[in-house]
Image: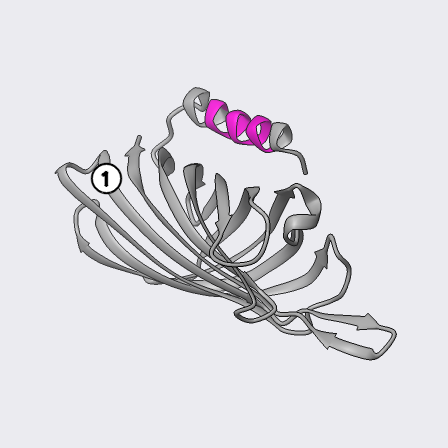
């Protein structure tokens, strides 16, 4: 998925959120912020650090939410390796099961430029989360997910892949304007085949986002 496609999807979701008619059970939100991350391949042999911009939009109706987010970051190697740009797109459909617990499915698409500098990946997400209200407009959410059917630009497969995350929102002035923070860790136990046999080539990343969200 190209960066232009990612921008088009995010813009479309934001436009739908802005134009959607108001209903009693409907929830609309959009936000933007700053992201910084660490990325590693082959254990600790290839390590990178990067930062950039991030944005998200969400539409909710009754027990269901559609969420889309995107981030564009520039990475620099901490030792060996080549600089690269990364565009990450996440789309999730979330269903609230209880007052606290929800289930979600979706996909993640991560594109790297230049392609050989790191691994682009596409994967499905199947997970659950628990949200704990603290005050009106403020809460803490913990989540976990299995990342299934991962496809990598350099080939190989990940028999095991997972994601864990922590999100917090705080409404210091109004319930409609919230300061948000999100921390996300992902690991892919990627394996590839070589002439000498199987090669373990794990990938892991940590991304933090800080921003502002407006809720309608």
The answer to whether residue 154 is left or right of residue 25 is right
Give the quarter of the figure containing the N terminus: top right
Residue 214 visible from this viewpoint: yes
Give the quarter of the figure containing the C terminus: top left
As helix, strand or loop, the secondary structure at mark 1 comes to strand
Rendered residue at 64%/30% (across/down): 5
What residue is shown with label 1?
A: 178
Q: Nearer the viewer, residue 79 or 179?
A: 79
Rendered residue at 66%/70% (across/down): 201
Quadrant in which residue 184 is drawn: bottom left
SS majority, magenta: helix
Where does the image place residue 117, in percent across and percent down from the top left?
Answer: 65, 49
Quadrant in which residue 160 is drawn: bottom right
Where does the image place residue 129, in percent across and percent down from the top left?
Answer: 41, 63
Q: Nearer the viewer, residue 152 or 13?
A: 152
Q: Judge whether residue 74 is colored magenta.
A: no
The answer to whether residue 113 is left or right of residue 18 is right
State whether residue 154 is above or below residue 17: below
Where does the image place residue 42, in percent across and percent down from the top left?
Answer: 61, 69
The answer to whether residue 102 is left or right of residue 105 is left
Quadrant in which residue 21 is drawn: top left
Rendered residue at 62%/44% (across/down): 112
Where does the image place residue 113, in percent across and percent down from the top left?
Answer: 64, 40
Residue 68 visible from this viewpoint: no
In magenta, the rendered stretch is 6-15
């Amino acid at each position: 998925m190209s960066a232009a496609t990612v921008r088009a999807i995010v813009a479309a979701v934001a436009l739908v959120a802005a134009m959607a008619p108001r209903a009693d059970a409907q929830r609309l939100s959009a936000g933007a912020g700053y992201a910084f991350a660490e990325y590693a391949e082959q254990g600790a042999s290839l390590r990178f650090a990067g930062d950039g911009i991030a944005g998200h939009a969400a539409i909710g109706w009754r027990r269901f939410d559609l969420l889309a987010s995107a981030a564009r970051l520039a990475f620099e190697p901490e030792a060996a390796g080549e600089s690269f740009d990364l565009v990450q797109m996440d789309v999730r459909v979330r269903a609230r099961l209880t007052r606290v617990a929800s289930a979600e499915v979706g996909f993640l698409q991560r594109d790297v430029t230049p392609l050989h500098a790191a691994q682009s990946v596409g994967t499905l997400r199947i997970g659950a989360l628990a949200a704990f209200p603290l005050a009106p407009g403020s809460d803490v959410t913990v989540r976990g997910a299995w990342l299934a059917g991962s496809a990598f630009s350099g080939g190989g497969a990940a028999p095991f892949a997972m994601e864990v995350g922590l999100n917090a929102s705080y409404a210091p002035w109004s319930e409609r304007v919230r300061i948000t923070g999100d921390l996300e860790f992902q690991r892919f136990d990627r394996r590839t085949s070589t002439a000498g046999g199987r090669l373990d080539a794990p990938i892991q990343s940590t991304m933090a986002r800080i921003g502002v969200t407006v809720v309608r």
